[in-house]
Image: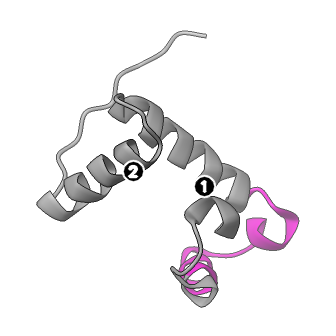
Amino acid sequence: MKLKSITFRCSEAQMSRLESAMNTLECDNRTAVLSDALETFLRFTEQEDIAGLNLFELVSRIDAEGSALEFASQA
C-alpha cells in the first residue's frame, strides 16, 4: 500500500485536544493519533444500524451518545 500525506490547519482548541490525546495515549506521533481516530470512526460508521444514516442523523446519533464516554467506547 502506498501511503499519502494529508496536511491541514487546526484551531488552537483542536490542537489542545490532539496534544491531550497524545499525552493520554502516551504517543508522541500526531499521525498515529489521527489515524487511530479515523479508523475508529470508520468502524463506527460501518455498523449496520449506522451505515444507513445520513449526515444529520449521524450527528444526532453521536450527540445522543454524549461525550461522557470515551470516543472508542461510543464507536
- The label on residue 21 is 2
Identify the main secondary structure in magenta: helix
Q: Nearer the viewer, residue 64 or 7?
A: 64
Q: Nearer the viewer, residue 24 or 10?
A: 24
Q: Which mark is residue 13?
A: none
Judged from the image, the secondary structure of the residue bearing numbered disc 1 is helix
Q: Residue at label 1? A: 41
In the rendered view, tell whether residue 67 sits above or below residue 20. below
Q: Residue at x 47, y 43 (%)?
A: 25
Q: Position of residue 53 (x, y in %)?
A: 70, 75
Farthest residue, direction left = 12
Q: CA distance from mark 1 to mark 2?
A: 15 Å
Amino acid carrying label 2: it is Ala
Tell me if mark 1 has few (under 14), some (14-19) or many (20+) residues whose alpha carbon lies within 10 angstroms of its own: some
**Which residues, given as a range, are shown in magenta?**
46-62
Q: Badge 2, how many Cα within 10 Å: few under 14, some, many 20+? A: some
Q: Residue at x 54, y 81 (%)?
A: 68
Whether residue 75 is visible, yes or no, is no
**Residue at image location 33% in from the left, 30% down from the top:** 6
Report which quarter residue 56 is drawn in: bottom right
Depth check: 63 or 52 in front? 63
User: Colour mode?
Assistant: one colour
Q: Is residue 55 above or below residue 51?
A: below
Q: Residue at x 34, y 34 (%)?
A: 30
Apparent side of residue 29 relative to residue 60 in the rendered image (left or right): left
